[in-house]
Image: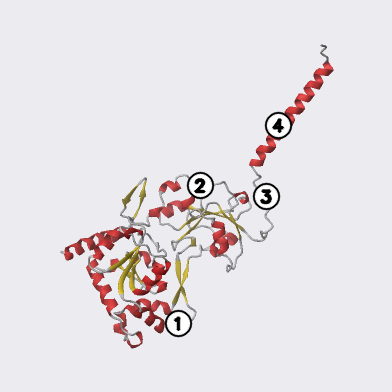
Amino acid sequence: MSFTLQGCNKAIFYSVSIISFSIICILNVNLAQFPATTRELPTSYHHDHPIVLTWTSFFGSDLAKLLEKKSDSCFYKCDYTSDKRLLNESSLIVFHSRDFTDFPQTRPDQLKVLYNLESPANSWPSLFRNVPQNYFNLTATYRTDSDVYVPYGIFEKRSVKDDIREKVNNIVANKTKLVLQLVSNCETQSKREMVTEALEKLINITSYGGCFGVDCGEQCEEEAIKSHYFYLAFENSVCQDYVTEKFFRLGSGIVPVVLSREVIKNVAPPESFIAVDDFYSLKKLAEYLTYVASKRFTSRKTNLLNRKRSIFRYFDWMSTYEIKHFDFAVCDLCQAAHKKPNSKYDNAVEWWLNGTCLNRHTSDEVELSWISNYGLIVLLLIVFVAISGQDAH
């Protein structure tokens, strides 16, 4: 067999061609797995609307879809997406802390929002360990001092004061029982279960929920609210401005009883609720609830002095305010995407975790931390339980 230079060259040429073709095929396959960081916007998007990108889910749900559903009435318009390939095109990126995954690199002009509706007591520090230093440049939480305020509900002032006398008369006329509680979380940071247990020794409390093995669906809950004067709206943690949907059941015609007036004062009118820490002991609270419920004056015939001693005073807020329920603060988020405000906080994580709760997680354990004025609240609650126990004997 003869071996010529020409044959060798042909063999090399074919070999190089095959290798080159193979490399191109491999590169094409790999590159397909890593799309370009920029892409053409979907035709449904408006090029003059900022894009709000939800980088995380919201307790497993698509947060972008939740925001979009609530956005119809917003003055400012945005496009909402959870498509991470639109990172570079996005003006505002939302990170829900309970669903943190990763933290992409962004441009300085992009807003990265720390979005949280759970209290710091229920926000484990481990969730924040991988957050880059000073990563977030906007906050969106239930706290009234957030850059974007995301309340569970708000008292919106009526343009014209409403005559609520007949409405309140009808509400009160249907009430025959004293206190209601609906509880599914049985062991809490606030130790509300201890307060409730002591209070049950003094007055009758109707209890529904998983903690008591008594289910109560939507219709059951509606009927229970109608028939009870007071509702124990004890939160699972005592934190600044942490007022959840429990409290906002007052819009259905029931008076909430909360653990701390200090926590509620920035959120609700002062006579729309009753606070445990307004009383010297749980016995005094129980006596007050019983007394107020017994004063079933017809509101039209009630003089000012008697009204202040009756259940009607706790419904007066209805003439001035109406309740607006949770809407994810989508309009304010979209406005931020348009206006690009500066955050009030250099370190959003530190602002969020430190100094606003009575207690919080430390590693895998829960410890009581005597923080700010809230330490006094727990001290009072312990005293209440002790005094009530002595009175019971």
Work out how far the residue at label 4 is from the one at label 2, CA to CA, in angstroms. 34 Å
Say which of marks 1 and 4 sits in front.
4
The answer, for residue 117, to whether it is visible in the render is yes
Q: Which residue is mark 3?
A: 39
Is 282 rendered above or below residue 87? below
Residue bearing mark 2 = 101
Is 308 placed above or below 267 here?
below
Mark 4 vs mark 3, foreground winner is 4
User: Tag 2's secondary structure?
Assistant: loop
| Closer to us: 357 or 323 | 323
**Which SS class for mark 3?**
loop
Task: Give the labeled residue for mark 4.
Answer: 23
How far across and how far down the image is residue 194, in percent? 27, 59
Using the rendered view, name the quadrant where residue 184 is placed.
Answer: bottom left
N-terminal label among 4 and 3: 4
Of callouts 2 and 3, which one flags the residue occurring earlier in the amino acid sequence? 3
Left or right of 82 on screen, residue 392: left
CA separation in Å, label 4 and label 3: 25 Å
Amino acid at dot 2: Thr
Q: CA distance from mark 1 to mark 2?
A: 48 Å
Relative to 178, is 62 on the left or the right? right
Q: Residue at x 83, y 14 (%)?
A: 4
Residue depicted at 26% across the width and 61% down the height: 197
The residue positioned farthest toward the left in the image shown:
393
Quadrant the C terminus occupies: bottom left
Identify the image quadrant of residue 358: bottom left
Q: Amino acid at mark 4?
A: Ile
- Circle 1 packing at 10 Å, graded few (<14), some (14-19), many (20+), is few
